[in-house]
Amino acid sequence: MATSLSATVALSAMLILGQFFFELDTNMRDFLSPAEAPFVLVTMVAGAVALFSASVYLSDTCGAIEQQPSGFFDIVSLICSRLSMIGTTAVVLVMFFEVVSRYLFEKPTLWANELSLWMAGFLFLLAGLYAMQQRSHIRIYVVYDLFPRWLQKLSDITSVLLIWVFTFLLIWGGYNEARDKFLRWETFGTAWDPPLPATIKPAILIVMALVAIQALSNLIADWNKMPEHHSPLDEIDEVEIQNIRKSIKE
């Protein structure tokens, strides 16, 4: 991770400095066809390795408010969640680069907005997978808490079954369109022209399938747990409260 991350930072810095100070011929269009620019291709490969290895490394550590992995699919979802967290930082850096380039060097970009949209599309999808793994999606417990345990289990089975039915219908109805967009490498139609439709549409189907698998993993992991009772007090984050108190004292 450290090696690939260092290589990515160094290569990216060379590309950025070369654009501003050395008038290198490399531009963001090369990132859409990296085979024609070996230096860009090496940078992208190093970045992909760094991104994946960092996501795997960070998935070993859970935050104070995160649920510990207990299902057979949790590690995959945690890796994807770390990928989305890193991606959020990347979106901020892209917008920061645009501001600096536009107002300090008077060289606005044609790609920052499209790249932010491109990354944000994947981030929202992966965030949904993370929410399912953490059981932080919208759940209404008013009636559920009144059920006996066997009826709660039946409700959980029904919920997972509905998710799988929805996923099957989504893939059934969207597969042909997603396949066609990917095979013809459909682009966004802007000045930079990234392949948003060609990548986002298949990603929707893939991530939805991962969400369905994660829902099944949750069902299996929670099957033998004791019944839970929920109240508004569950929403209080004691760790955050302690951090606030500590910061006030300091």
Image (cartoon, grey):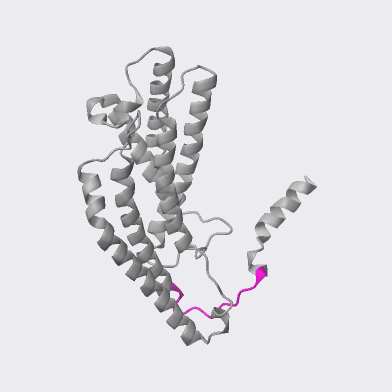
Residue 232 location in percent, x, y? 66, 69
- Predominant SS of the magenta segment: loop
The structure residue drawn at horizontal position 36% and vertical position 74%, both measured from the top left corner, is 161
Residue 152 location in percent, x, y? 49, 82
Up/down of 23 relative to 212, above or below: above
Residue 157 location in percent, x, y? 40, 78
User: On the image, which quarter does residue 42 sit in?
Assistant: top left
199 and 218: which is toward the camera = 199
Is 116 placed left or right of 194 in the picture? right
Is 248 placed left or right of 24 in the picture? right
User: On the image, which quarter does residue 66 sit in?
Assistant: bottom right
The structure residue drawn at horizontal position 31% and vertical position 56%, both measured from the top left corner, is 205
Magenta part of the chain:
221-232
- Quadrant of the snapshot with the C terminus: top right
Is 168 placed left or right of 55 in the picture? left
User: On the image, which quarter does residue 18 sit in?
Assistant: top left
Identity of the residue furthest to the right in this view: 249
Residue 17 location in percent, x, y? 43, 18
230 part of magenta stretch: yes
The structure residue drawn at horizontal position 28% and vertical position 57%, both measured from the top left corner, is 174
Identity of the residue furthest to the top in this view: 22
129 part of magenta stretch: no
Up/down of 230 relative to 201, above or below: below
Is 71 placed left or right of 246 in the picture? left
